[in-house]
Amino acid sequence: MVSWETSIRPIYIRNHDNAKMVCEINTETGGIIERLRTDMPETVKYWRGFYKNIDIGVMGIFASSIGPILFINQNYYPLIKDEYNIEWMKKGGGLDKREFTFYYKDKEIYRIEYDEVQCFYTNPYEEDEEFRDFFLWVYDNKTNENFYNFYKYSEVN
């Protein structure tokens, strides 16, 4: 388990694609429990980050004192430059398929091929693909300094 400094136990992050769900991360053990948002107390404060359901469980990113941490189920990967890489591409005859691959320390950790994410709203011109597609959002931010600054969090701020 990757360790980072926080006195918050547990942390809660929102589901990227389903507003009804919340991910509870036990910051001491690394345990993950997905909960219905309606089961959460109204006073719960959500941590900076998002997650989504994937074919093998859950995947997400949250802020920490050491910077953004990507998790896949109970496996945690600090997104430290030069220690990870992400590939993303359009595929298929009509380019309606997508492929996302996450590497950590030169080892392939997760690969998924998926259908293009459709619009959430009725006007497709009001949202871009990065907004709809969690995997594209992660890929597009791998060299974004603002992303690293935003997901490096200290409770003493």
Image: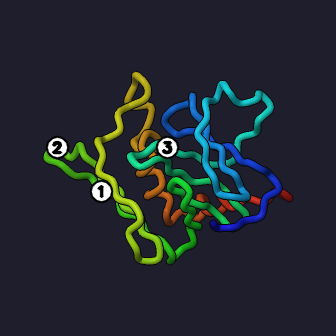
Q: Residue at x 54, y 51 (%)?
A: 60
Of pointers 2 and 3, the one earlier in the residue sequence: 3
Mark 2 or 3: in front is 3
Q: Nearer the viewer, residue 79 or 157?
A: 79
> Is the C-beta separation of discs 1 and 3 under 8 Å?
no
Return the x and y of residue 111 as percentages of the image width and height: 35, 58
Are the residues flagged by discs 2 and 1 in contact, CB closer than 8 Å?
no
Outermost residue to the top:
122
**Is residue 148 among the parts visible in the rendering?**
yes
Type of residue at label 2?
Gly
Residue 143 is left or right of residue 62, and the answer is: left
- Circle 1 sits on which residue? 89
Q: Residue at x 57, y 72 (%)?
A: 80
Q: Residue at x 69, y 61 (%)?
A: 152
Q: Is residue 6 left or right of residue 91?
A: right
Density class for disc 1 (Cα within 10 Å; few <14, some 14-19, many ≥20) is few
Do labels 2 and 3 touch, CB within 8 Å?
A: no
Q: Amino acid at mark 3?
A: Lys
User: How far apart are the two marked residues, 2 and 1, measured between alpha carbons?
Assistant: 13 Å
Name the residue that disc number 2 marks.
94
Where 103 falls versus 135 (above or below)? below
Q: How many marks?
A: 3
Along the horizontal axis of the image, is 29 left or right of 85? right
Marks 2 and 1, the one that precedes in the sequence: 1
Q: CA distance from mark 1 to mark 3?
A: 19 Å
Q: Which residue is mark 3?
A: 52
Question: In front: mark 1 or mark 3?
Answer: 3
Q: Earlier in the sequence, mark 1 or mark 3?
A: 3
Q: CA distance from mark 2 to mark 3?
A: 25 Å
User: SS class of the residue under badge 1?
Assistant: strand
Image check: 106 left or right of 3? left
